[in-house]
Amino acid sequence: MPRTATLIAAAALTALVALAGCGSRQKLTAVEGMKPVPPAYGAVGAAGPNELLEPSTQSRPERNVELRRKSEARVDDPFDLPPE
């Protein structure tokens, strides 16, 4: 029994060490021979790494967290048609 516990502990330790290297963060640098990102249409200059990593409003929209206090009648929807 003790040998099995030692093997499990060794396997868990190995997995933790392997996963520890996955979360490292380094400064972004361009690879040699790689062309820079072209500027967006209408932009003054090319965006840097920080601007490219910042999510846009469309990818992270603001949420409306207003809760309903009472039931409300639905407004008429002209596109809510019965199936044909």
Image (cartoon, rainbow, N blue to C red):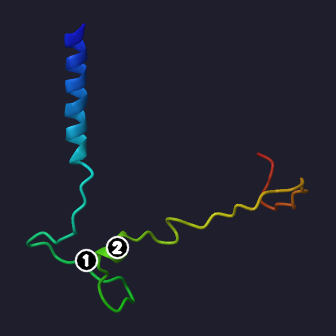
Where residue 6 appears, x then y in whole percent?
A: 21, 18
Where residue 31 appears, x then y in whole percent?
A: 12, 69
- Nearer-the-camera pick, 55 or 77: 55
Residue type at tag 2? Leu
The residue at the point 40 percent across, 71 percent down is 54
* Residue sitting farthest toward the bottom: 44
Q: Earlier in the sequence, mark 2 or mark 1?
A: 1
- The residue identified by callout 2 is 52
Residue type at tag 1? Val
Where residue 33 appears, x then y in whole percent?
A: 8, 73
Q: SS of the residue at dot 2? A: helix
Q: Is residue 36 above or below residue 62?
A: below
- The answer to whether the residues at label 2 and label 1 have Cβ atoms under 8 Å apart is yes
The residue at the point 91 percent across, 56 percent down is 73
Crowd rating for badge 1 (residues with CA inside 10 Å; few <14, some 14–19, many 20+): few
Q: Is residue 72 left or right of residue 3?
A: right
Q: Is residue 18 left or right of residue 79?
A: left
Task: Examine the image and state in which quarter residue 30 appears.
Answer: bottom left
* Residue sitting farthest toward the top: 1
Check the picture and name the quadrant holding the N terminus: top left
- Nearer-the-camera pick, 80 or 83: 80
In front: label 2 or label 1:
2
Q: Disc count in the image?
A: 2
Q: Is residue 10 above or below residue 59?
A: above
Crowd rating for badge 2 (residues with CA inside 10 Å; few <14, some 14–19, many 20+): few
The residue at the point 87 percent across, 61 percent down is 76
The residue at the point 25 percent across, 77 percent down is 37
Q: SS of the residue at dot 1? A: loop
- The residue identified by callout 1 is 37
Q: Which mark is residue 67?
A: none
Task: Examine the image and state in which quarter residue 32 appears.
Answer: bottom left
Q: CA distance from mark 2 to mark 1?
A: 10 Å
